[in-house]
Image: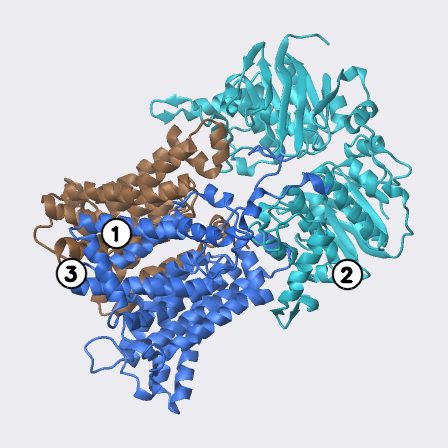
Amino acid sequence: MTEGAIELELRGITKQYPGVLANDAISMTVRSGEIHAIVGENGAGKSTLMSILFGLVAPDDGEILVRGERVQFKSALDAIASGLGMVHQAFQLFPTMTVADNVVYGHEPRRGWFIDRASSVRQVGDLAKSYGLGIDPSARIEHLRVGALQRVEILKALYRDARVLILDEPTAVLTPQERDGLFEVLRRLRADGRTILFITHKLNEVMAISDRVTVLRRGRVVHEVATSDTSPAELSIAMTGRSVDTSRRRAEHAVGASLLEVSHLRVDDADGIRRVDDVSLTVHEGEIVGVAGVTGSGQAELIEAIMGLRPVTDGTITLQGEDVVHLDLRGRRDAGLAYVPEDRHRVGSAALASTSQNLFMAYQWQRRFQRRGWLNRRAVERHARELIDTYDIKVAGPDQKVAELSGGNLQKVVVARELAHDAPVLIAEQPTRGVDVGASEFIHGQLVAHRDAGRGVLLVSAELWEILALSTTIFVMFDGRLVAQLDPHETDDVEIGLYMTGANEQQRVHT
Amino acid sequence: MFDRLFDSALLLSVVRATIPILLAAMGGLICERAGVFQISLEGTMLVGAFTAVSMSYVSGNAYVGVLCGMAAGVATSSLLAVGHVSRKGDPIVIGIAINLLAVGLTGFLLPQFFDLRGVFRDPAIVGLSTYALPGLSRIPVIGSALFQLTLPGYCAFLLVPLIWVLLFRTPVGLRLRGVGENAPAAQTRGVPVTTYQYAAVLISGALAGLAGAQLALGNVVQFSENMSAGRGWIAVVAVLLGQAHPLGVLAAAMLFGLAEGLGFRLQGNGLAVQITDALPWVVTLIALFIARKRFIRLLDLTGRAA
Amino acid sequence: MSSNVSIPDRFHATGGVTRAGHRFSAGLRSPVTVALVLSFGIAAVILLASGANPLTAYSEMWKGATTGAGPRTIIDRAIPIVGMALAISIPLRSGIINLGGEGQMVVGGLAAALTGIHMPGPAALVIIASFLAGTAAGVVWALLPALGQTAIQLPILITSLLLNAPARALTSYLVKYYFGDKTATSTTTVALPPHSRLPKLDWLFGGASATVLLIAVLVIAISLFNNRTAAGYQSFISGINLRFARYGGVHVTRQTVASMAVGGAIAGMVGAHLVLGQSGRFVDGDLAGSGFAWTGLLVCLLAVSRPVPILIAGAFFAALQVGGLAMQRNAGISGQLAQVLQAVVILALAMRVVPAVRRRRRGHAGSSGDLAIADEEPLGALRPDPVESDAGSAAPGIAAR
């Protein structure tokens, strides 16, 4: 590999969020004409780093140098002016406009007062052709598939003549074929002398496409190496750090009768794309079933389908022997499901309601709280106080609005409410995301206690250490399918990581 | 029967009924494209009508009235601009409050300024004159209806192609549409979202004010309390029905104009005034019913998407 | 682990001795107070511009509202205003804006009038039947937009409004061609027989209509519904976060239909009251022309859909109108000033003239549940986007990790 000039340099970039040191003195260099992968687990600080690099977030400390010159980005516009282009995970496009309009937006070629449409279509078409992007400039965005949208984002950056292209988890939304196409495009861009920063946690892709790798863990650079000198196993160890607390899963419990059985479940989204493909799993009494996987592998859709928030295309869901597919969400809750949702703000709580009101959700129709629709307010209040005490929720009182609670405390409200249902099966989705260490440990302890009480837990997490620390059985989900069923005693983070990133694949798993 | 129904007089009344709705709806269209839900057209129109009549009366010049009406429209809509675009207030509540403020304010000022209630009619109010386009106005049947209009009347129909060109052929229009479709994306491309939204709201105020001026100095020459009589609301629906496309909105506005004009004619033919009064509203409801499932954005806005 | 979570300082401010003082100063700084002061200021400017003396105007308003027949007239006027505000509050609390109160009230009024005129039988029975007829008509008129939204996704906001004019036209048509008083010059029904008039109760504020009792019952019932029932809890949650409500098992469709129906029922009752309790006949254009539906909507917005504050705000707006009319009689200043004041108050609140930042900094954990139009953010709860990002995902436009 040729050593090019230094294109981009970061020196001591630091960013502190309340309770989280997102970036801790990150320094790294990116050379011209290389594909540089940045890998790390969820929460390692990758997204924060990219936001800083693209002028969306100001760092507390540190500096950025582009081609040796110190720059300070006040907004994305400054970053673009310095020759940086970013392809976001969430595309920033205008759905009803054409590809050409999207690409030239803000810098339209003009003829007099008008947009020179012929010229914009030609320019965009030429650009697409020269990098093999294969996009019709006259197509409307809303008619394009996700893979094509991504190529439009790349075109946008190229149109503004970006020398450095930053791609944030670019393959999360792509099919394998689209991914291969993207890699081809990236190689062409490299051949053209452009530099690419490739953010991912899929190690197989790192191995396939990158020239160098920087590994982030907990906000720090822990490893920087030429791709040819490393292996997926080494990177995986660097990413996860092997500092997994394994104490909890030692206290093994006898596994009892089956509680939740999902069989050959298929879920298609509104566009007819298959999000969950032939998934079968069982949660038994006294079991925490972990579903590991990179975010966006179909876990969210699987959970929504089980809860009744998303229609099932095919397959069965039975709860303690009862078929629940035909029941609505309330019916399924009554049949024995509780649910800690991934998005505690939009789905799991109402910011303007009091703590007591938030703790009461999905209890309102239960016998012990109402008679013929009339609430027993004393019982409601007692319920709130009990939960606040039992789960150590830091509030001024049951009447305090949850908008005023910290993230960890709000999550405790959600978890407390769902645990207190004492449902046979608790579904916990990313239960500790964005939560401080103390609250996170507390929540883990509660999940284990729930299991020890003979209940079942279905734990979905993108955090490997969390899955390893808690689960009695581990499934790995990749691309809508369960690609592995693993025994936590016989596996480790490296192996799971390989399945999660699609580097390994067992035979299709069924239980 | 049809001979008696459809003639140039009918066409004329349809065109006259269409013009104020079209003007206001074009303003609403621009706001919709900029991502601002504009439901204060009704009140803005009313303020425009009152100001236009007052200033025409005072100055003795219809165009002074028209310009003042437009300025009053801009002032009225600035409440929405400041309250919603800058201060992020709820556009629906602000819009409702503006509409009611307009009714109250014009109703208050009418007796205060002119010492009368209900209807302000005076020879000193100078109405808008019509201008015949040479040659074209001689075309039988349609000539006198389409080519003998007031300046705001011509303006209304000219705005349709103009706004079409602006939206779909110029950089400003492209950017405006982008602001409405995905404001954060527009912002990262260096387009000042707030400026565009302010401009859109203020232009809609000017156009709604112009609509009011046409109503009070063109269609009739008088001001009566609450004389906009729901036309601003119909303009809001026209924007929805026409999917914020100039031609679609024109078609919707003409549909309502037709309902009003036809109602007026049928009334002359002895149909109950109640039926003809309800006609534009019922037509609106039927049109909504036919074009349903296109209003998801609005349902999102009111938080009740199915 | 408990040590790294600190309770914000602000909560200490509401304890003990400081509480009364805190509450008082919070009341003074509350957005509603500021908006009221502001609107009287703005109206004063308008008065000056129109050549009137604001001091004369306001003192005449005050006199008109507080002396002579003023207080009783206020009650007469407050009945329909409060009633319509209650009608609108039920759907609004669950996040639905019903602009069709006027139409629901008008059809209710006609249905009640026709029942009262034509139904034989004992007075009490006729009155009750008339109210029920008005209620039923209001329900029907409210269900049209409700089903339009739940079945075919036509937004209630628009359809409810569009149905007002057809309601006016339909009632007018029926009165003119089928049920009218042929001897009268205007479009009106005959007068109700005396026994189907709603009695005025001498012991009630010196002769207020018996509907006051109905309003009192409604206020109590709605308060109980809001605070004591599962459905009331669910409607509150739907109004502030619909996704959370769905997640918690609320049947949103059922709720939409039910809350519109109840709102329509109350609007229909108000229509019945206006005929049976005030005019004694259905006069075309009277009900719609009264503007009670719209005043009620403003009252409901000001009171953030809560019944007891609606009572207070409704009485206040009625007083403004009565004072306005007195001012018009005695000082020759147009009474429509009252409408201006009402709209400006709501506008000032909706435009968030009082900065939100200051409200957020002030803790008021102790003052929730106060009856007074207190220091909550009015209108803010209508359609909030309560999402505040956690640490780490603070970059807008970038998908969270």
Residue farthest to the left? B123
Q: Which residue is mark 1?
A: B46
Question: What color is chain C drawn in?
Answer: blue
Mark 3 and mark 1 residues within 8 Å of each other at the beta carbon: no
Element under label 3? loop
Q: Measuring 27% from the left and 48% from the top, which residue is drawn there?
A: C42
Q: Is residue C206 visible?
A: yes
Q: Position of residue A425 (x, y in %)?
A: 78, 55
Residue C332 got which mark? 3
Q: Identify residue type, mark 1.
A: Leu
Have a look at marks 1 and 2 and say if they share a chain.
no
Q: CA distance from mark 3 to mark 1?
A: 24 Å
Closer to viewer: mark 2 or mark 3: 3
Q: Chain of mark 2?
A: A
Q: CA distance from mark 1 to mark 2?
A: 60 Å
Q: Which residue is mark 2?
A: A323
For the residue carrying disc 2, how many other residues have a C-alpha within 10 Å: few (<14), some (14-19), or many (20+)? some
Q: Chain of mark 3?
A: C
Q: Position of residue B299 (x, y in %)?
A: 49, 52
Query: What chain is the brown one?
Result: B
Q: Position of residue B226 (x, y in %)?
A: 25, 57
Q: Chain of mark 1?
A: B
Left or right, A411 with respect to B203, comes to right
